[in-house]
Image (cartoon, grey):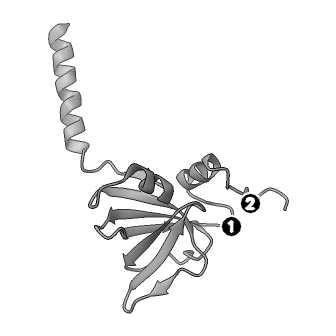
Amino acid sequence: IAGGLAILGLAAGLVHYALRDSIVFFYTPSEISEKNVLPGTRLRLGGLVEEGSISKAGGTTVSFVVTDTIKTLNVSYTGQLPDLFREGQGVVAEGVLDASGVFIADTVLAKHDETYMPKEVVDALKEQGVYKDPKADP
């Protein structure tokens, strides 16, 4: 039994070691500020695209601001944005935080219909008490 547990522990350790680079944590702008995430750490940033924050810097580079209505974080992305990407909508960006505090995204995901927002974003906004259900009557 002890030998079996040792082999199982070794296998679990090897799996954890092999997956360490593919584990990506989800954060809102407030959580990044609170937890002092180190530059170069790979993560997912979620929130809402702030109104009036999208600017194109030539070519396919786009800058925008992601907010959770408490804190904001500047994002730079080079590539083709999803067709449904727009201001005021939920977004999840995956990438790294650079030394100047700008999030350099290599993947941007946007909602796919009028009522969808990524689950992580909804949960974070509910936790902060600022989520507005799109199905609720105004």
- Pointer 1: residues within 10 angstroms few (<14), some, or many (20+)? few
The residue indicated by pointer 2 is: 134
The image shows a total of numbered marks equal to 2
The residue indicated by pointer 1 is: 114
Name the element at disc 2. Answer: loop
Name the element at disc 1. Answer: loop
In depth, the one of 120 and 102 nearer the eye is 102
Residue 26, image x, y percentages: 43, 52
Q: Is residue 73 visible?
A: yes
Q: Which quarter of the rendered picture does the C terminus lie within?
A: bottom right
The answer to which of marks 1 and 2 sits earlier in the sequence is: 1
In depth, the one of 13 and 112 nearer the eye is 13
* CA–CA distance in space, label 1 to label 2: 8 Å
The answer to whether 40 is drawn above or below residue 89 in the figure is above
In this view, the residue farthest toward the bottom is: 58
Residue 95, image x, y percentages: 34, 64
Residue at 41 percent of width and 57 percent of height? 44
Within the image, what quadrant is residue 85 found in?
bottom right
In depth, the one of 116 and 48 nearer the eye is 48
The answer to whether marks 1 and 2 mark residues whose Cβ atoms lie closer than 8 Å is yes
The answer to whether 105 is drawn above or below residue 9 in the figure is below
- Pointer 2: residues within 10 angstroms few (<14), some, or many (20+)? few
In this view, the residue farthest toward the top is: 1
Residue 98, image x, y percentages: 30, 67
Within the image, what quadrant is residue 4 found in?
top left
| Three-letter code for the amino acid on which mark 1 is drawn | Glu
107 relative position to 116: left or right: left
Residue at 59 percent of width and 66 percent of height? 112
Q: Which quarter of the rendered picture does the N terminus lie within?
A: top left
The answer to whether 104 is drawn above or below residue 80 in the figure is above
Residue at 38 percent of width and 92 percent of height? 58
